[in-house]
Amino acid sequence: MLSLSRISLPLRVLLTVLFLISSGFLLSASGKSDEYTFLPLLTFGCLFITLFLIFNIFPIKLYQRIFLGLLFGALVGLIWGDSILVFEPVGKAFIRLIKMIVIPLVFASLIVGTASMQDIRKLGRIGLKTILFYLISTAMAVTIGLIIANVIRPGSALPEAIRTELGQNYMAEADSKLAALDRTGPVELLLNIIPENPLQAMSEGQMLQVIFFALMAGIALTYISDSRKTGIINFFDGVTEAMIKMVQLIMRLAPYGVFALIAGVIGQYGSEIMLSLAGYFIATLFALLVHVLFFNTLVVRFLTGVSIKRFWSGISQALVVAFSSSSSSATLPVTMECAQDNLDVKPEIASFVLPLGSTINMDGTAIFQGVSAVFIATIYGISLTFPDQLTIVLTATLASIGTAGAPQVGIIMLTLVLESIGIPLEGIALILGVERFLDMARTMVNVTSDLSCACFINTQEV
Ligand code: ASP
């Protein structure tokens, strides 16, 4: 990656100030005049170089850059209003890059996730109980997220006029998409999950159908001989890894993408949207807290032999690693150690339940997806029907199986949930600025849930 570390600090600051002043000048000029078509382009280039310079004055982490991108975007949007729409293509390019990964990532990681359950039959009872626990806890998590989001309704404080305008703009773009969306009864909804042609489902981005097919393919793989399936699983494992790498590469552009998207949104609709974002942030953290305090703590209290105090102090190390790494897979070794050393989970149970959990059990991610879906829908003035909310529970639960335990994969999977009910993916731009911190928080919840399941199974199998 391009770095300015060889240029001395005073020179970097000077360059930044020069470009900042030029950008301001160009922005005011391009806002006033339509005559010079090269002007917006020049402004465009100048502002992005300025951003690059600002990000490079001091070495800062990516999430800090994204947050700065959000702040600068908001500022520029507030100052220059509508004329900032000249940057729209940058934001759109960023969203397209994210969309590009969804289908291959979902498909490959779901196949690997499901096929990794190959020991289920071997482990019989334990396997079945574990899977059931994970599915129920995730469905529970997304339901808690949805209930809290529906009660708090982050985004509803946004003036009606702005929401209508946002909604109308979106509708104008996506009329055909919405028309194609099946909003009929629950029977059709379920029937529609089965694809007639999996390749068509992929090319049309029919997420539930893709998930269904990937799950079936993963399950089928567990039935064929090791010599045959190893190659296939390795292949999809490689694809998943490459896609995760691609997420990381694309995320390097996030500060610029977020800048352009937020500047556009605020330029067009004003600063109230930022306040709604604070509401969304608090609602998500609150929902995560409610889930661990009620669901996980109650499970530990009533369904395991471990005391609540011992559970929380025993898992604290794993929580710290989860928070700082934002990756349940990277945390796995510590999670296993906490389970065995502090909670006396038998090694054979820990070695099955926890790796499986770090692949398929993502309660925190599911909560995040539920709250985000409601928030973005509210912002766009879309009211979610009961079947819509049911679809969110279903997609988020399934998506969590396909969410690899790596940083920011949850946001890619969110596109899947949003798309399944026709919520504009552009809404992701609004939440990206605070997403990194939410990722840290939801990864802690993901790990807590895996550990509470390990205690539950351990107690059951004494
Ligand atoms: N970072 C999360 C995890 O590793 C996944 C996500 O929600 O992005 O558990």
Image (cartoon, helix red, strand yellow):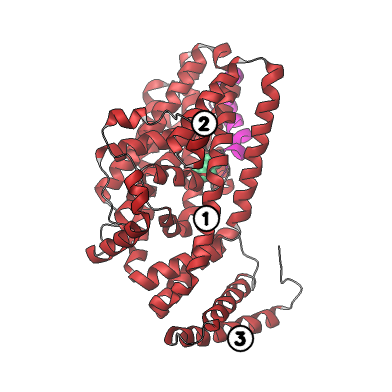
The residues bearing labels 2 and 1 have C-alpha atoms spaced at a distance of 26 Å
Report whether 31 appears left or right of 161: right
Foreground pick, 258 / 227: 227
Mark 1: which secondary structure?
helix
* Mark 1 burial class by Cα count in 10 Å: few <14, some 14-19, many 20+: few
Going from N to C along the chain, the mark reached first, 3 or 1, is 3
Report whether 432 appears left or right of 233: left
The circle on residue 350 is none
The residues bearing labels 2 and 3 have C-alpha atoms spaced at a distance of 50 Å
Mark 2: which secondary structure?
helix
User: Which residue is denoted by mark 3 in the rendering?
Assistant: 18
Q: Residue at x 28, y 65 (%)?
A: 162
* Mark 3 burial class by Cα count in 10 Å: few <14, some 14-19, many 20+: few
Q: Is residue 335 magenta?
A: yes
Q: Residue at x 59, y 76 (%)?
A: 45
The residues bearing labels 3 and 1 have C-alpha atoms spaced at a distance of 32 Å
Q: Estimate the x, y position of residue 46 in percent, counting from the top left.
A: 59, 79
Amino acid, disc 1: Arg
Amino acid, disc 2: Ile
User: Which residue is denoted by mark 2 in the rendering?
Assistant: 360
Task: Using the rendered image of the protein, determine whether residue 67 is visible from the camera's viewpoint.
Answer: no
Q: CB atoms at circles 3 and 1 under 8 Å apart?
A: no
| Residue 168 in which image quadrant | bottom left
Residue stretch in magenta = 327-349
| Residue 161 in which image quadrant | bottom left
Q: Residue at x 48, y 43 (%)?
A: 413
Q: Estimate the x, y position of residue 156 in percent, counting from the top left.
A: 26, 57
- Quadrant (top left/top right/bottom left/bottom right) for the N terminus: bottom right
User: Which residue is denoted by mark 1 in the rendering?
Assistant: 96
Q: Estimate the x, y position of residue 124 in percent, counting from the top left.
A: 52, 11
Q: Is mark 2 within 8 Å of ligand 1?
A: no
Placement of 248 over or under 29, stated as above or below: above
